[in-house]
Image (cartoon, rainbow, N blue to C red):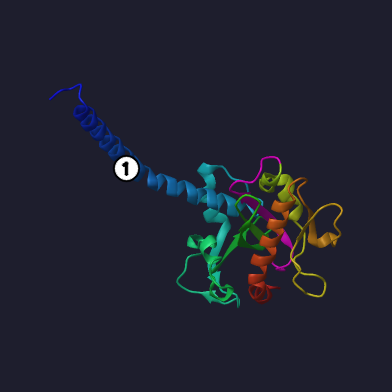
């Protein structure tokens, strides 16, 4: 065989491609369990963040097991659905279904004040892609205890600010029902925009589309839990 010929070059390149592909495939398979575990831990951190508990990665599992005392799934009528694990529900997939067919996860947290907080997940769309988060409510099923939001690709310094404490903290203490018991959600308002103080937080300066996307996410997803909130209200 002429080692300087095209045949040798082609065979050599083909063998190397096969070897590299095999190595990458083995590496991907080997790393998959670790990647899955990291995703689970991050999700648990996010759920805990909605009840104002920030925890290091290595402590996440133990703190989550201690603080999250119950998790289940309900439907839009507020009825518990058996046989579905709340943690395994994919909110993106649920959003593709009619509201009456959706699985709606609920997490119950026992915090330092011994009052149970009810946590629900959220999923929506910002300027450049998906946004998501968690809202926790006090046992009156009206007052927001805490909030956590994140995004896939919002603009740094603008829409991406939804993932900061500066934006999230003002949600604490706001109400999602008005004094008449009507669901009004939360308005994410520009300073020039009028909205009742108890039902509004300031929008992100320069991030109007992301802010309004988050407002729509809150409106759309929280209203799916209205019947559940009414049943749990004390």
Q: Residues within 10 Å of mark 1 (few under 14, many from 20)?
A: few
The outermost residue toward the left is 1
Q: Foreground residue, 229 or 219?
A: 219
The quadrant of the rendering that contains the N terminus is top left
Q: What residue is rendered at 58% in x and 56% in y?
A: 67
Find the magenta span and give its range: 137-157
Q: What residue is rendered at 64% in x and 52% in y?
A: 149
Q: Is residue 29 left or right of residue 129?
A: left
Q: Secondary structure at mark 1?
A: helix
- Residue 78 spot, x, y in % from top left: 60, 76
Q: Is residue 213 left or right of residue 78?
A: right
Q: Is residue 146 magenta?
A: yes
Instruction: Judge whether residue 137 can be spotted in this image.
Output: no
The quadrant of the rendering that contains the C terminus is bottom right
Q: Total of numbered circles in the picture?
A: 1
Rendered image quadrant of residue 216: bottom right
Q: Is residue 213 left or right of residue 18?
A: right
Q: What residue is rendered at 64% in x and 46% in y?
A: 154
- Residue 4 spot, x, y in % from top left: 20, 21
Q: Foreground residue, 10 or 125?
A: 10
User: Where does label 1 land, which residue?
Assistant: 25
- Residue 91 spot, x, y in % from top left: 54, 62
- Residue 198 spot, x, y in % from top left: 82, 61
Q: Foreground residue, 200 or 171?
A: 200
The outermost residue toward the top is 4
Q: Is residue 2 magenta?
A: no
81 to 149, vertically: above or below: below
Instruction: Judge whether residue 20 can be spotted in this image.
Output: yes
């Amino acid at each position: 065989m002429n080692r300087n010929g095209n045949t040798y070059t082609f065979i050599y390149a083909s063998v190397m491609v096969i070897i590299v592909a095999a190595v990458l495939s083995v590496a991907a398979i080997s790393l998959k369990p670790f990647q899955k575990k990291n995703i689970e831990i991050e999700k648990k951190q996010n759920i805990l963040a909605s009840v104002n508990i920030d925890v290091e990665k290595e402590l996440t599992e133990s703190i989550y097991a201690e603080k999250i005392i119950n998790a289940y799934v309900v439907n839009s009528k507020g009825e518990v659905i058996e046989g579905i694990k709340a943690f395994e529900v994919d909110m993106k997939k649920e959003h593709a279904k009619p509201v009456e067919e959706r699985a709606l996860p609920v997490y119950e947290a026992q915090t330092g004040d011994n009052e149970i907080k009810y946590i629900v997940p959220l999923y929506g769309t910002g300027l450049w892609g998906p946004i998501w988060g968690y809202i926790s409510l006090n046992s009156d099923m009206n007052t927001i205890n805490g909030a956590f939001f994140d995004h896939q690709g919002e603009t740094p310094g603008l829409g991406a600010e939804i993932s900061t404490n500066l934006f999230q903290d003002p949600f604490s203490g706001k109400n999602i029902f008005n004094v008449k018991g009507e669901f009004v959600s939360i308005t994410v308002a520009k300073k020039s925009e009028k909205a009742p103080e108890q039902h509004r937080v300031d929008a992100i300066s320069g991030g109007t589309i992301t802010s309004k996307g988050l407002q729509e996410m809150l409106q759309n997803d929280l209203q799916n839990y209205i019947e559940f909130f009414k049943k749990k209200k004390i």
